[in-house]
Image (cartoon, rainbow, N blue to C red):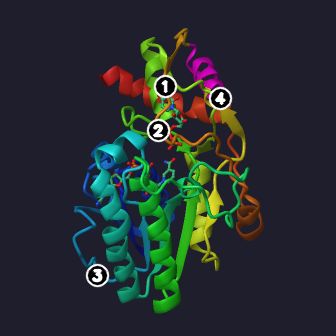
Amino acid sequence: MHVLVTGAAGFLGSHLTDRLLGEGHSVLGVDNLSTGDPQNLAHLAHEPRFRFELRDICEPFDPGPVDYVFNLASPASPPEYLRLAIETLRVGSVGTENTLQIAARHGAGFLHASTSECYGDPLVHPQTEDYWGNVNPVGPRSVYDEAKRFAEALVMAYHRSRGVNTHLVRIFNTYGPRLHPSDGRVISNFFMQALKGEPLTVYGDGNQTRSFCYVDDLIEGILRLSRSEEHFPVNIGNPDEFTILECAQAVLEATGSKSELRFHPLPEDDPARRRPDITRARTILDWKPQVALKEGLAKSLPFFQKKLDRL
Ligand code: NAD
Ligand code: UDP
């Protein structure tokens, strides 16, 4: 297959690209490098089945015939999407429509990277795909949440009205090597702080929860969904739920660090809890995560260690 991956220089996009190349496909990766890192693709410099184009997907483009489009382009960490507020809304709307048009024009399959943020600060726990969410449409996080919710509506409209073979994955917090060490997400922040011996920055009282999925599990789930007949959203994430305090403790154990915890104010609208119900993924895709948090943190450690050595 000829595959287009948008956001290819990002954390998930680069891992997905590696998996697709490993399966023998050819990949065109596009990225505007707004939050991505070319280093994530540096190992593919001499790979003849991979080509990279620096471009903003909000500008219309035609990559020529493609069999599949994976649309991952979007800032993803809260500090980055707050910094790139309008860009985030545009990539979820204009950018996503541009890539849907590519899929429609070339008869390609299409998978959009949506998010557990569609559930907002959820009143249903764990979150099932048929829960409509509790999102503040005008709060600071709305630039991301509403972009993703609009994108889901757009994807469903291209499926229903134009017959595009679309798929929607709702990704829950995912971590692993290539998570940008300074993009502000909790696992990368805690790793870098622990390795430097600095205090770990816990926001709020640290009793809010997240459910962390290791990147290899996530990519496997995305690939299975892309090959399925399912057009409605599917949660992909690890249902093991941790408080942020437990997460801090786990990173301290993984790194052997003696850093202390330092408490900071909780960001506005920070969701109190997050846990995927993965019944749909289990049933339809025969998928479940294989890597527990402790093991995933151990697998991630060498990446963050190397980043620290290069600072
Ligand atoms: P990332 O920031 O590492 O990667 C996103 C990539 O998209 C970056 O390389 C960035 O430069 C690129 N990009 C942004 N705007 C663009 C534009 N207009 N044109 C071209 N490229 C653009 O983030 P990630 O964690 O790899 O996330 C990938 C996708 O998965 C995103 O859509 C994100 O919303 C979604 N997601 C990720 C998680 C997670 O835990 N990692 C959770 C939920 C959803
Ligand atoms: N968080 C934290 N310290 C940090 C970064 C994040 O306590 O240095 C908290 C944040 O407030 C949230 C959780 O960790 O409750 C997950 O944050 P992240 O930005 O990784 O992802 P989110 O799920 O909020 O999009």
Q: Which residues are magenta?
A: 245-256
Q: Earlier in the sequence, mark 1 or mark 4?
A: 1
Foreground mark, 2 or 4, reads 2
Q: Earlier in the sequence, mark 2 or mark 1?
A: 1
Relative to residue 29, is residue 255 drawn left or right?
A: right
Q: Is residue 21 above or below residue 177?
A: below
**How far is disc 3 from disc 4 in space, using C-alphas?**
49 Å
The reply to whether the C-beta atoms of the residues labelled 1 and 4 are less than 8 Å apart is no
**How far is disc 2 from disc 1 in space, using C-alphas?**
24 Å
Look at the image and tell me whether residue 194 can be seen.
no
Q: Which mark is residue 244?
A: none
**How far is disc 3 from disc 2 in space, using C-alphas?**
43 Å
What amino acid type is highlighted by mark number 3? Gly
Would residue 1 be counted in the magenta stretch? no
Foreground mark, 1 or 3, reads 1
**Closest to the observer, 222 or 157:** 157
Residue named by callout 3: 64
The residue drawn where x is 64% and y is 60% is 235
What amino acid type is highlighted by mark number 1? Phe
Residue named by callout 1: 191
Where on the picture, by quarter, is residue 77? top left
What amino acid type is highlighted by mark number 2? Glu
The kind of secondary structure element at disc 1 is helix
Residue named by callout 2: 268
Residue named by callout 4: 207
Q: Earlier in the sequence, mark 3 or mark 4?
A: 3
**How far is disc 2 from disc 4 in space, using C-alphas?**
15 Å
